[in-house]
Image (cartoon, grey):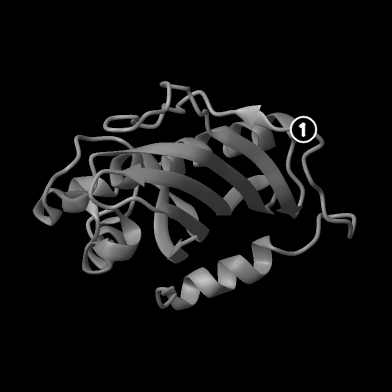
C-alpha cells in the first residue's frame, strides 16, 4: 500500500472539510443516490454476467452554510469529476494493454499540476501496473462521499472520499481496492482535482 504525499493546501482543505456542519453536528446523507455519469465495469474475459454497477454518490459533512439545492448540485458535480477519473484510470478501456496507454488523459478533471503528479504515480493512480496482465475486470463497489467547505454560503472546496473495488481476470486474477481522498476546488467555474491521498491494495 502506498499513499501519495499531499499538497500542503490539500491537507488544509481536508482538515477543514472533514469537520462539523455549521451547527456543530456532522451531517451524513440519509440515503444514497446514483451518479448520472456512472458507467458499468468491464466484464471482458470474465465468467460474470455483465451487471451494471452504478457509482453511489453521497453527501458527507458540510463546513459552513450552504443551501440544500447548491449542496446537492456540488455533490453531483464533484462526484461526476471523480467518477470520470475512476472510469478512465481503472474501469474503462480495453485490456490487456501497455502501461504507456496511461497518459495525461487518464486523469480528466485534474489540474495540470495534479495530472503530472498522478502520471508519476500511475501505478497507484491507474491500472498501469497490471494492465498488461489482465483480460478485463468486474467492478464490485464504486462509492464517492463528498464533503463540502462553504464560505459566505458558497461552496469553495470539496473532499471526495472514494471506495472502488474490482476483481480482475486473465493471467492475473485478484481483488483490488482503491480508497482514499481527492481534494477539489473551483477553477474557471469548474471543479478540479488539485491533490490526493490515495491507497491501492490487493484484498
10 Å crowding of disc 1: few (<14), some (14-19), many (20+): few
Circle 1: element type:
loop
Residue 142 percent location from the top left of the image: 52, 40
Relative horizontal placement of residue 160, taking residue 32 as reference (left or right): left
Residue 168 percent location from the top left of the image: 35, 45
Relative horizontal placement of residue 174, taking residue 76 as reference (left or right): left
Q: Residue 34 or 192: which is nearer the viewer? A: 34
Q: Quadrant of residue 111?
A: bottom left
Q: Quadrant of residue 105?
A: top left
Relative horizontal placement of residue 79, taking residue 188 as reference (left or right): right
Residue 1 percent location from the top left of the image: 44, 73
Is residue 32 something one can see in this rendering? Answer: yes
Relative horizontal placement of residue 51, taking residue 100 as reference (left or right): right
**Residue bearing the label numbered 1:** 31
Q: Quadrant of residue 85?
A: top left
Residue at left offset 57%, top offset 73%? 12
Q: Residue 6 or 74: which is nearer the viewer? A: 6
Residue at left offset 28%, top offset 53%? 172
Instruction: Give the total number of marks visible in the rendering.
Output: 1
Residue at left offset 41%, top offset 78%? 5
Q: Residue 177 or 46: which is nearer the viewer? A: 46
Is residue 188 something one can see in this rendering? Answer: no
Relative to 50, is 171 above or below?
Answer: below
Residue at left offset 63%, top offset 47%? 145
Q: Residue 15 or 99: which is nearer the viewer? A: 99
Relative to 32, is 22 above or below?
Answer: below
Residue 43 percent location from the top left of the image: 34, 29
Amino acid at each position: 500500500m502506498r499513499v501519495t504525499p499531499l499538497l500542503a493546501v490539500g491537507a488544509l482543505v481536508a482538515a477543514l472539510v472533514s469537520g462539523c456542519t455549521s451547527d456543530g453536528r456532522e451531517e451524513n446523507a440519509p440515503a444514497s443516490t446514483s451518479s448520472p455519469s456512472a458507467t458499468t465495469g468491464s466484464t471482458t474475459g470474465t465468467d460474470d454476467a455483465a451487471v451494471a454497477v452504478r457509482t453511489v454518490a453521497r453527501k458527507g459533512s458540510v463546513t459552513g452554510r450552504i443551501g440544500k439545492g447548491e449542496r446537492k448540485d456540488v455533490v453531483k458535480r464533484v462526484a461526476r469529476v471523480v467518477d470520470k477519473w475512476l472510469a478512465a484510470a481503472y474501469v474503462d478501456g480495453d485490456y490487456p494493454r501497455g502501461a504507456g496507454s496511461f497518459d495525461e488523459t487518464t486523469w480528466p478533471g485534474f489540474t495540470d499540476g495534479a495530472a503530472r503528479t498522478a502520471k508519476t504515480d500511475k501505478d497507484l493512480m491507474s491500472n498501469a501496473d497490471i494492465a498488461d496482465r489482465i483480460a478485463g475486470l468486474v467492478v464490485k463497489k464504486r462509492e464517492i462521499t463528498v464533503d463540502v467547505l462553504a464560505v459566505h454560503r458558497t461552496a469553495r472546496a470539496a473532499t471526495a472520499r472514494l471506495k472502488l473495488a474490482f476483481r480482475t481476470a486473465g493471467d492475473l486474477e485478484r481483488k483490488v481496492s482503491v480508497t482514499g481522498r481527492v481534494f477539489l476546488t473551483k477553477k474557471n467555474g469548474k471543479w478540479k482535482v488539485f491533490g490526493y491521498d490515495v491507497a491501492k491494495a490487493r484484498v
